[in-house]
Amino acid sequence: MTSFTIIGTGTMGSAIGGVLASGGSDVNHVAHADITPLTGDVVVLAVPFHAIDEIVGAYGDQLAGKIVVDITNPLNFETFDSLVVPADSSAAAEIQAKLPESIVLKAFNTTFAATLASKKIGALATTVLIAGDDADAKQALADALVAGGVEAIDAGALVRAHELEALGFLQLTLAAGEKLPWTGGFAVVR
């Protein structure tokens, strides 16, 4: 069974941890300000994008050799009108460049905490889209999520994080503009 350390104790970190734990995974949570040994095989960065540099600085050596899951949406939260990464890049790509000895995956950024906790979007199962360059790492995360009661889809290589972040940006701006509830979101029908 894969073990997980979730950096971040907010609603997303709690919801992700709940799904993983309900599937039988070993999950521990670390507040992003704490410097604690990272014991999980997989480390989920359940923090805002602006906290990534601090976390990489504090935990970079411990993240080497681990699967690192980036859930961020690098949104300009002052204006809510743009992403703060270069147009041809993604937060996940920037994290991978900072952590060359880690396997970085993009996941959870197109789901809200409420839909992870309920495992539903309307009448449909919540689906987590996963992008990354390591098929085994993506499968390990997908297996843990499916065991926890949500769906998972391999969205392709890490370069697809760019599109996932655009989708997350759209979903967030719709919810912030009260055109979409925080308990809703985009669902996948197969």
Image: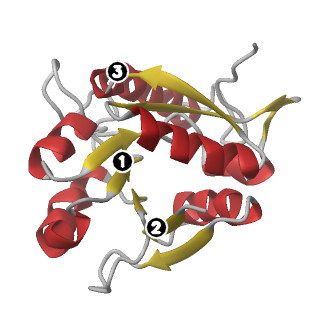
Task: Check disc 1 and report its element: helix, strand or loop.
Answer: strand
Q: Label 1 to label 3, Cα distance in Å?
A: 13 Å
Q: Amino acid at mark 2?
A: Ile
Residue at point 31% right, 59% down?
Answer: 66
Q: Is residue 42 left or right of residue 190?
A: left
Q: Label 2 to label 3, Cα distance in Å?
A: 23 Å
User: How many circles with numbers are drawn on the protein?
Assistant: 3
Residue under label 1: 70
Residue at point 59% right, 40% down?
Answer: 142
Can the viewer see residue 115?
A: no
Q: Amino acid at mark 3?
A: Arg
Residue under label 2: 6
- Residue 32, percent from left and from top: 34, 74
Q: Label 1 to label 2, Cα distance in Å?
A: 11 Å
- Residue 39, percent from left and from top: 40, 77
Q: Is residue 62 above or below residue 95?
A: below
Within 10 Å of disc 2 (Cα), the crowding (few <14, some 14-19, many 20+) is: many
Q: Is residue 147 left or right of residue 60?
A: right
